[in-house]
Image (tube, rainbow, N blue to C red):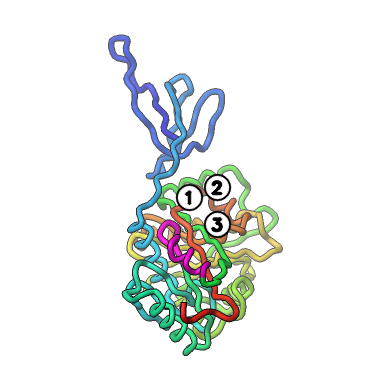
Amino acid sequence: MVIRRIVAVHQGRPRFSDLLGELVDWSDDHAVVRTDSGAVVTVPRSRIAVGKRVPPRRPRLGEVFALERVAAEGWPAPDTRWLGQWLLRAAEGWTNRANSVLVLGDPGLPLPEAMAEVYRWYAERGLQPRFVLTHPGGAALAAELRRLGWEQTHRVQVRTASLAALQTALQQASDRRTPHQEVGDVEVRVASQPSPAWLRIAAGAKGELPPAALAVLTGPSKVGFLSVTTATGEVLGIVRAVVTAEWVGVSLLEVIPEVRRRGLGRSLMGAAAQWGAERGAQRVYLQVEETNHAAIQLYAGLGLTIHHEYTIHRPPPQPDRVG
């Protein structure tokens, strides 16, 4: 929202200042706004002249592609090839992100030739091709893929926030709740390599881990594997954090079913944010499927808003390779 508030009165005339941010509380007495910098500002209702809802600014296509490049570096497939501005990625079939064509522009070839090259490259690796198309940016190619019989399989939200805003939201959530109710004493540990227990929970979330999975997970130079652990060493939840430029990427946030909804996910998010801040990150991003309602509720409650979305597409059972 943008709130026009009275900040002073001079010679009987009010002076105004506009406050832009997310409305996090509204009562009969005051409004509370969290700005992009993470500052939380309380405004007495008597000082509010007018308020207006403002839709989030849509990112420019260049900003979308830039963040997708950052995310690709943070989840690096061990086998890649650039075809113009298409990034072909393969990792023994482990995860869609690491085994798909990330479209960041033009392939540098007529579309039928580019598609034939994609089919050939993935066939050599025993894989079915997939495409990742950003929105905005991917509508034209998505329409062409539909014409060729391709199917959209997933829609994914890319959510972002400043680290300052995320840390403020985490602190507010912590103030409202009793930490780790009925779980007992736990701590969050950080390692530069995933432990066997960490990998077991990751495999439960993402499926059996082939050798290429470890290359994806450990490939970046600044990567941390965080786990929330009991006093006896039992791992209750995990998350992976990676720093690229000003961004910390958060992935594989997973808490075992027996102790969900007890604040452990927020503890892991807070530890990942702090780990990223210590390594120079200023903003956070993550990807979440639009059908994962529980995760979306958690992230939205922490102030992570949708930066853009992308869709994943797979070919028909008997694709028309001529196009």
- Depth check, front residue: 193 or 36: 36
**Badge 1 element:** strand
- Of circles 3 and 2, the one toward us is 2
Q: Amino acid at mark 3?
A: Ser
Q: Is residue 135 above or below residue 101?
A: above
Residue drawn at the location 48% of the way across and 63% of the way down: 143
Neighbour class for label 3 at 10 Å: few (<14), some, many (≥20)? many
Task: State the predominant SS element of the stretch in magenta.
Answer: helix
Q: Is residue 99 above or below residue 39?
A: below
**Badge 2 element:** helix
Q: Position of residue 183 (x, y in %)?
A: 67, 58
- Depth check, front residue: 206 or 178: 206
- Depth check, front residue: 280 or 84: 84
**Residue ID for mark 1:** 305
- Of circles 3 and 1, the one toward us is 1
**Residue ID for mark 2:** 301
Quarter of the picture holding the N terminus? top left
Q: Position of residue 163 (x, y in %)?
A: 41, 52
Q: Which residues are magenta?
A: 133-147
Q: Amino acid at mark 2?
A: Gly
Q: Is residue 182 above or below residue 97?
A: above
Name which of mark 3 and mark 2 comes first in the sequence: 3
Residue drawn at the location 46% of the way across and 34% of the way down: 53
**Residue ID for mark 3:** 267
Q: Position of residue 194 (x, y in %)?
A: 51, 76
